[in-house]
Image (cartoon, grey):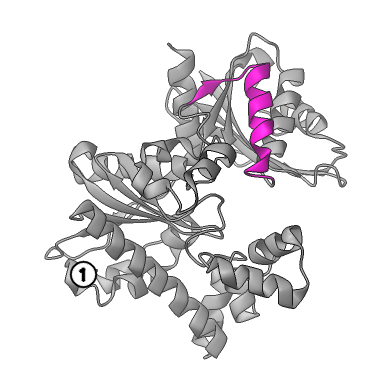
Amino acid sequence: MLILVVNAGSSSLKYQLINMDDESVLAKGNCDRIGIDGHISHKTADGRTLEEEYSFPTHTEAFEKLIDTLLNSEASVISSMSEISAVGHRIVQGAEVFSETTLVTDEVIEKIDELAELAPVHNHAHALALRACRKVFDESVPQVVVFDTAFHQTMPPKAYMYGIPYEDYEKYHVRKYGFHGTSHRFVSAALAEAMGRDLKDLKIVSCHLGNGSSITAVEGGKSIDTSMGFTPLDGLIMGTRSGAIDASAVTYLAKKLGFDPDQMSNYLNKQCGFLGVSHISSDNRDITKAVGEGDERAILTADMLRYEIKKFIGSYAAVMNGLDAVIFTGGIGENAFEVREGVCTNMDVLGIKIDTELNQTVRGKLCKISTEDSKVEVWVVPTNEELLIARDTLELISK
């Protein structure tokens, strides 16, 4: 059975075609610059590639080109659309409306679009892509939505509530939602399998570190707290996002800079983080290079990230009253040994010790990097959100 997994942004359409018989990826790619001009980048499992400029006025044309590429190009992998059994979509914000994987209907799409107020960068684009996909695929092909926020719906009120009047929470739904839930769920299960333990018996801190980063406390396979909040802005310092900041500092800066709310949101989401502090780059690889050259602002940026990760690991170990394992995943977590070493150094209070020589050799592969005498196991676990979306899609359509 073949399942097409789609991750749509406002101007992009990333995809993977997965054979669920062996969970292999037959092809993957990205239709980007939608609404601007258009370009498709496509690669098959056997190494064939396609790069082509193509006009994508809307997501509909992108879907049509995606299918044509899978079917008719020099890098085709199927001979008929009927070979695709279902389509699974990643959706960023499900709020309190969607707590589980859901079959797509017109009503579901409308509700996802309504939630765009809570995720303006993502949810409207998801809705556009869902409508486009339904135009391209026959109604007999089931479509499924998997929500980033769903995994965090197990958080207790004491973890997700803010100290605002309760009626404003009820009226405006302002609370912590958390994100990267699909990734945290995948790597937690993969870790339990690697450790040979039942996930229900484990207390895990999962660190998804990339251009966007979040940390989640996973107890018994359930999210009980997470670093991102009402939006993906909260928590750690990130590529261009500030992370946690005193709300009064936000209003103070807005007045000083003469920004309205939308301008202030853009400032905090696009001009801060690694980029704002270092004035070098939003990419951790560039920060690491500059650290090696002795750049003081780069050193500060790197120190801030490692310090904040340490704080979350410590606080989540406290709220779980114990810690069995720490996971590093995401682009930074899987590849930046310097970050992992910086976080895990001087963590004697939790009994965390890593093999520094081994750690320096691990990039993008499943590996335990803690020493045998470490009280807490530390693992690098590559994430695979697309595979989990495909698995969820298969499970739902098989019911």
Residue 381, position as x, y percentages in the image: 36, 51
Q: Tell me which secondary structure the magenta stretch mostly adopts.
A: helix
What residue is at 58 percent from the left and 19 percent from the top? 86
What residue is at 50 percent from the left and 33 percent from the top? 96
Q: Is residue 158 above or below residue 16?
A: below
Q: Quadrant of residue 62?
A: top right
What residue is at 21 percent from the left and 37 percent from the top? 200
Among all residues in the image, which is located at the extreme left?
Answer: 373
Task: Residue 48: say if magenta.
Answer: no
Q: Image quadrant for the C terminus?
A: top left
Q: Is residue 47 above or below residue 308?
A: above
Residue 146, position as x, y percentages in the image: 52, 31
Q: How many marks?
A: 1
Task: Residue 107: say if magenta.
Answer: yes
Q: Neighbour class for label 1 at 10 Å: few (<14), some, many (≥20)?
A: many
Q: Quadrant of residue 362?
A: bottom left
Q: Is residue 118 above or below residue 355?
A: above
Residue 159, position as x, y percentages in the image: 37, 49
Residue under label 1, please give it. 353
Q: Quadrant of residue 376?
A: bottom left
Can residue 49 be seen?
Answer: no
347 with respect to 230 (left or right): left
Q: Which residues are magenta?
A: 101-120
Q: Nearer the viewer, residue 243 or 84?
A: 243
Q: Nearer the viewer, residue 276 or 370?
A: 276
Q: Looking at numbered disc 1 in the image, what kind of residue is underneath it? A: Lys
